[in-house]
Image (cartoon, grey):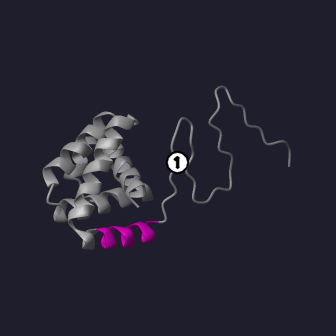
Amino acid sequence: MIDAAVSAIGAAAGAYGQAVLTAAEDEAASGTVRLGQRLLALIRRRAGNRGQVEAAVLDAAAHQGDPDFQAGLRAQVRKALETDPDLAEELAVLLADGGVATAAGDRSVAVELNYGIISTGDSAVNRISGS
């Protein structure tokens, strides 16, 4: 559960940077980013370590994809969950309702539903031959 929450919060932080701490939900944001915003808002309202969570989110936003900063964010989310068991239940509900597909690593693709081509290779050429 912590990994899924951190992944979604990281997506929100990556999309909004520092503004993720103040931005309202954006209708144009992807489902993962919106979920990350909702999770972060809940954690910030309830966490005793709010300042540390916020600092970890800003670090993760500034160093996108850096596993050290993702680990820092993960640690702060875990601390928040350890001090508030009800928070863990609420996050689990949000995550279950979120329908988030997650992927990790270079050229990873997270897809909930796809009817087209997904190509992540260098110099990839995709062709659809005659109908």
- The single residue placed furthest to the front in the displayed view is 82
Residue 68, percent from left and from top: 34, 35
The residue tagged 1 is 103
Q: Residue at x 39, y 37 (%)?
A: 67
* 92 vs 14: above or below: below
* Depth order, front residue of 1/130: 1
- Compare residues 84 and 95 and report the one nearer the observer: 84
Q: Main secondary structure of the magenta part?
A: helix
Residue shown at the point (18%, 61%) measured from the top left: 47
The quarter of the rendered structure image containing the N terminus is bottom left
Residue at the image position 28 percent from the left and 34 percent from the top: 62
Left or right of residue 123, residue 9 in this image = left
Three-letter amino acid code of the residue under disc 1: Ala
Q: Quadrant of residue 130?
A: top right
Quarter of the image where one finds residue 34: bottom left
Give x and y (percent) for residue 15. 35, 45
Q: Secondary structure at mark 1?
A: loop
Front residue of 105/111: it is 105
126 horizontally vs 71: left or right: right
Residue 12: x percent and y percent? Answer: 34, 50
Q: Magenta region: which residues?
A: 88-98
Residue 70 colored in magenta in the image: no
